[in-house]
Image: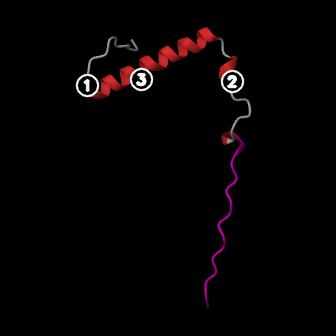
Amino acid sequence: MPSTLKPPQRAIQLALFRASRNEPNWNGVPIEVQQQVLRLLSRMLRDHVARRRGEPTLREDRDE
């Protein structure tokens, strides 16, 4: 007797993991805050690249 395969059931996404409709609007953020965020992100990226290369970073932040 041939076996019949059932088609896979479509998974139901829980409400917890659904995309939010209230996404932040970058253009609504004050220009001063945008500049601070961009400076912080660029510093974090430079520090990350320096650490991966084994270079010393300018400043070490510690949780003490």
Query: Which residue corresponds to the image point at 37% horizontal and 24% vertical from the top-left?
Result: 48
Q: Are marks 2 and 1 in contact (CB under 8 Å)?
A: no
Dot 3 surroundings within 10 Å: few (below 14), some, or many (20 or more)? few
For marks 2 and 1, give the CA distance: 37 Å
Which residue lies under the disc numbered 2? Answer: 25
Which residue lies under the disc numbered 3? Answer: 45
Query: Which residue corresponds to the image point at 31% horizontal and 23% vertical from the top-left?
Result: 50
Q: Is residue 2 left or right of residue 12?
A: left
SS at badge 3:
helix
| Secondary structure mostly seen in the magenta stretch | loop
Dot 1 surroundings within 10 Å: few (below 14), some, or many (20 or more)? few
Query: Which residue corresponds to the image point at 27% horizontal and 27% vertical from the top-left?
Result: 53
Q: Is residue 36 left or right of residue 42?
A: right
Name the spot of residue 5 as percent of width and height, x first: 63, 76
SS at badge 2:
loop
Magenta stretch contains residue 55: no
Which residue lies under the disc numbered 1? Answer: 54
> Does residue 26 sit above or below 19 in this rendering?
above
> Does residue 4 sit above or below 57 in this rendering?
below
Mark 2: which amino acid? Answer: Asn
Identify the magenta region.
1-15
Query: Which residue corresponds to the image point at 68% horizontal and 39% vertical from the top-left?
Result: 19
Name the spot of residue 56 as percent of width and height, x first: 27, 17
Q: Quadrant of the C terminus?
A: top left
Q: Is residue 28 left or right of residue 60?
A: right
